Image (tube, grey):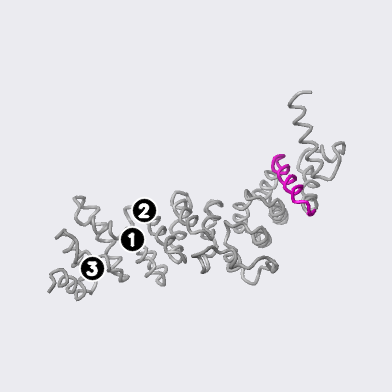
Amino acid sequence: MSSSTTQSDRKSDSTAVFAGHSSNDQGATTTGSNARRPFDAQLPATYSGSDKQEQARMRQVFIDQGGLDVVLRDLRSSDSAEARAVAVRTLGVVGSPLTTAHLIAALFDPSPEVRRAAAEVLNQVRDPAVSIGSLHAFFGTDLNLNQSAPPIESQVVEGATQALIQVDNSLADVPPSTVAHLQSPDPEKRCAALFAVVRSDAKARFNVISKYFGDPSPDVRNAAALALSELEPEQTAELFSQAIDASPNHSSNIGNALIGSGLAAKAIDELSGEDRERGRRALCMLMVMAKINAVEPLVRAIEEHESVVVRGAAIRILTLNGQAELAEAAVKRRLKI
């Protein structure tokens, strides 16, 4: 018997097992879209047994034999909302980490039925890459999540005790895997995801990054500052000004992130550089910081910086921002008057 014949027989037998038929059943060998309907329909029943090893084996057979690809194709391209919702729930039965990104993408499906199914399945599978709290916040009372599931608090890692950024339509064209990491309870994954957003072609990159100045983790807020500075390097000050205007309640977070990320120190050092354009952009950035009262780096520059140019620029920025007394006090401390 040839190797190809053996593989073909195995595939036929495996498909028959999922479909609930013997290998001699006509339903197991039917081709076309109708062939997979018994296959999909029998999947939840196949997984309902208590034998965990058998469940794991059948899950792997399902993936190996292309069942997962079929379901994902339905989810992506079916015109029927009902079919897409069935595909979502089948992904929940499969229970593979490979499905998380696709489930998150389904949260933005135009059909409420599909969105609700995706949220319920994500709540059910409890992938640690997903903040369950954000699902509750996004869907509110419209979603009847499984009340027997573990408490939301048990899914939150140390240092992330506040609610994460809510899922909304600004993430609709962000790659699903990136969305999953943006919603992760792990701050490091959220940081990495912000830089992935910068590298993506998403139209709402600015909006997505700006939202994360409200993240509970200082590290993530610092990453948001660095990500925003990479978005349009020649218009960094303008982007930060827009972020402040869009979220005035986060202005102190933005100021602290500019300091914590090192962007403020970099701007101050560039004031004394030979590149005039860089110096101009640095002045603009520091003016934005002064606007939101993030003046600590400017005061420290007056007190400690060795460059006369930098000290003079810091004094002018504070004075132009109506904080001449603050600049004068810093000068006196430098001179120890």
Q: Amino acid at mark 2?
A: Glu
Q: Would residue 150 be counted in the magenta stretch? A: no
Mark with earlier residue (1, 3): 1
Q: Which residues are magenta?
A: 48-66
Residue, disc 3: 299
- Nearer the observer, disc 2 or disc 3? 3
**Residue drawn at 68 percent across, 61 percent down:** 113
User: Marks 1/3: CA distance?
Assistant: 23 Å
Identify the main secondary structure in magenta. helix
Tell me the element at label 2: loop
Tell me the tag on residue 238.
1
Q: Position of residue 76 (x, y in %)?
A: 64, 49
Q: Would residue 60 be counted in the magenta stretch? A: yes
In the rendered view, does 170 fall on the left or right side of 42?
A: left
For the residue carrying disc 2, how many other residues have a C-alpha within 10 Å: few (<14), some (14-19), or many (20+)? some
Residue, disc 2: 232
Q: Position of residue 156 (x, y in %)?
A: 56, 64
Tell me the tag on residue 19.
none
